[in-house]
Image (cartoon, rainbow, N blue to C red):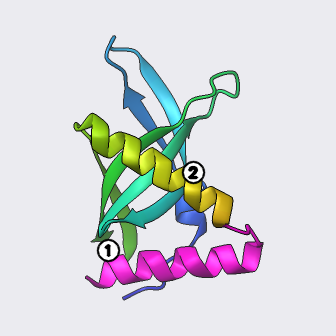
Amino acid sequence: MADFNLEDIEEMTVELELEDGSKLECEVIYIFEWNGDDYAALTPTDEEIEELYFFGIAIHDNGGQPEIELLQIEDEETLEAIADAFDEMLDEEEFEDDEEDAKWDEFINKKLED
């Protein structure tokens, strides 16, 4: 299997359709594992909107390139627990570029091998 390129995720944007039918472009800022499942944290590319969205994710191998499928989180309690876990991770993380890159690469390559 081809090695995963971190820039594929770091520069990934997705377009979300909101409840009112409008579209919102977001960037994937972090992918993490919690309670055995995988999640993505997204934020709007419009810097005037300060929101954070969480989705479950499934990572598929698409010809050697990762393809991420966003999964809606329906349960409010689960969503709150994921947001809390994300906040705790940010509090504990030391975002040093080399270490962060290695964690991303290890995480994605592990998921693509499953």
Which numbered disc, 2 or 1, marks the residue that appears first in the sequence? 1
- Residue 6 higher or lower than 38, as above or below: below
Q: Quadrant of the N terminus?
A: bottom left
Please name the residue shown 57% across and 51% down the image.
Answer: 87
Q: Residue, x 31% and y 17% (percent of image)?
A: 19
Q: Which x, y percent locates residue 8?
A: 53, 63
Q: Residues within 10 Å of mark 2 (few under 14, many from 20)?
A: few
- In 3D space, how far apart are the residues under numbered discs 2 and 1 (Cα atoms)? 34 Å
Q: Is residue 91 left or right of residue 21?
A: right
Q: Position of residue 62 (x, y in %)?
A: 30, 69
Q: Residue at x 61, y 82 (%)?
A: 102
| Principal secondary structure, stretch drawn in magenta | helix
Q: Quadrant of residue 50?
A: top right
The span shown in magenta is 93-114
Relative to 79, 71 lies left or right: left
The reply to whether callout 2 and callout 1 are in contact (CB within 8 Å) is no
Q: Residue at the spot x=65%, y=65% of the render?
A: 92
Does dot 1 land on a helix, a strand or a loop?
loop
Residue 41, position as x, y percentages in the image? 49, 48
Q: Looking at the picture, which amino acid does disc 2 mark?
A: Asp
Q: Based on the displayed image, in which of its 4 quarters is residue 94 positioned?
A: bottom right
* Viewer-closest of 43 and 77: 77
Q: Which mark is residue 63?
A: 1
Q: Residue furthest bottom?
A: 1
From the viewer's perspective, is 54 left or right of 98?
Answer: left
Q: Which residue bears the numbered disc 2?
A: 87
Residue 70 magenta: no
